[in-house]
Amino acid sequence: MLQTLDSLQPNWQQALARWFAAEQGSLLLKSCGGQDLAKLRSVLQQICSPVQSVTLLTEDLEVVAGPLTLQSWDPQATGHFAHLYLERSASSSHMSRLAAIVARLRAPDGCPWDRAQTPESLTPYILEEAYETVAAIRAGDPAAIAEELGDLLLQVVLQSQIFAEQNHFDLEAVAARIADKLIRRHPHVFGDAVMADLPELHRSWEQIKQRERPDQSLGQKLLHYAQSLPPLMAALKISCKVVGAGFEWPTVEGIWAKIREEEAELRRELERDPPDPTRQEAELGDLLFALVNLGRWYGLDAAQALAQTNLRFARRFLRMEELAQEPAGSLPGGGKSSLLKGRSLQELEVLWQQAKQEYL
């Protein structure tokens, strides 16, 4: 965890000492470049270890020099800087260890399975680990979240290692690019820009993204979303983007009318003889897209809504199975219940209504 400390605030030296003693996270020591550098180095050496890693940064957090140790840092030999980044060795050792382990697994005498992997073969694992991370977050289990984040991190390190072997980029380049992007897209934090409110912040974000890819049209963006995102997420993203370009119904009644229109077209295709599965699928997709738009109008996320419905249904069905194995005093016929298979529709409806009361 990165902590920050402003060297212009009173008693910053005591705060620095507390940080060093706590042995938790790295530190960004802000606004220290204008001080007497010889005195600054002396203070740091008195509080920290001589081998403490320091990196000199500009106001925009670009590297001027480093990482260096306090012992090897010569203030007279380095250029002008604004901040110091003091890296906690323990905070980076496990990342370095993970990268080294993955490199060893990919070595000629490493693990045959790891050596056989390609960026394409690892793609399903990225999706799997991402979904499992989301599930852990939704469950609110910190231990599970930490474990799943580690599994997801492994995929980042693996991909970076493979591309490093092909002389394209490495893990350091990946980290550098996202760090540069964060600074570039937050001029209100790392620059002089002032944002009045969240809508202005959002507009600034979109303008910066547009400057990064000036030749990309809105249609190309929509195509990118359609090709890269899960379908419901892509539908919502596409809907929001075209609304921003003025492609919107005047009132919500227009969306309701579109839903009725798509429902009728789907019904006609489903009743067509002979059936055309391609056209049926297209009409079903049109109806789903209209429903996503309805949710968007009311600030609802269709993917999130469907995820909750899936979870609620699964829990209710599990409860039905549990109820079916209990003494069925409230079920027709009484006696010891068997599993759901073979039960009448009436019995299943009774079980469903009981389960539904517990998972509304």
Image (cartoon, helix red, strand yellow):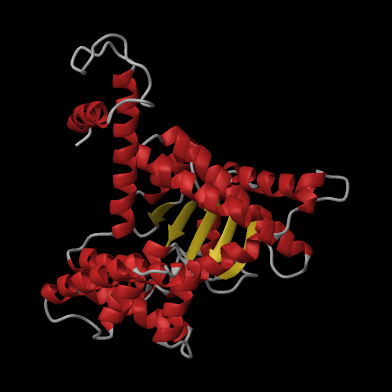
Which one is in front, 329 or 108? 329
Q: Is residue 57 visible?
A: no
Q: Quadrant of the C terminus?
A: top left
Q: Residue at x 50, y 57 (%)?
A: 40
Q: Residue at x 41, y 85 (%)?
A: 219
Which one is in front, 222 or 175? 222
Q: Residue at x 50, y 50 (%)?
A: 130
> Residue 75 location, x and y as percent?
60, 65
Is 73 situated left or right of 247 in this image? Answer: right
Which one is in front, 25 or 35? 25
List the single residue furthest toward the right: 109
Is 336 situated left or right of 43 in this image? Answer: left
Please tell me in which quadrant of the rendered image residue 250 appears.
bottom left
Please tell me in which quadrant of the rendered image residue 41 appears.
bottom right
How many labels were placed on the picture?
A: 0
Residue 262's place in the image compared with 244, above or below, is above
List the single residue furthest toward the bottom: 215
> Residue 317 location, x and y as percent?
32, 32
Which one is in front, 111 or 99? 111
Is 10 situated left or right of 298 in this image? Answer: right
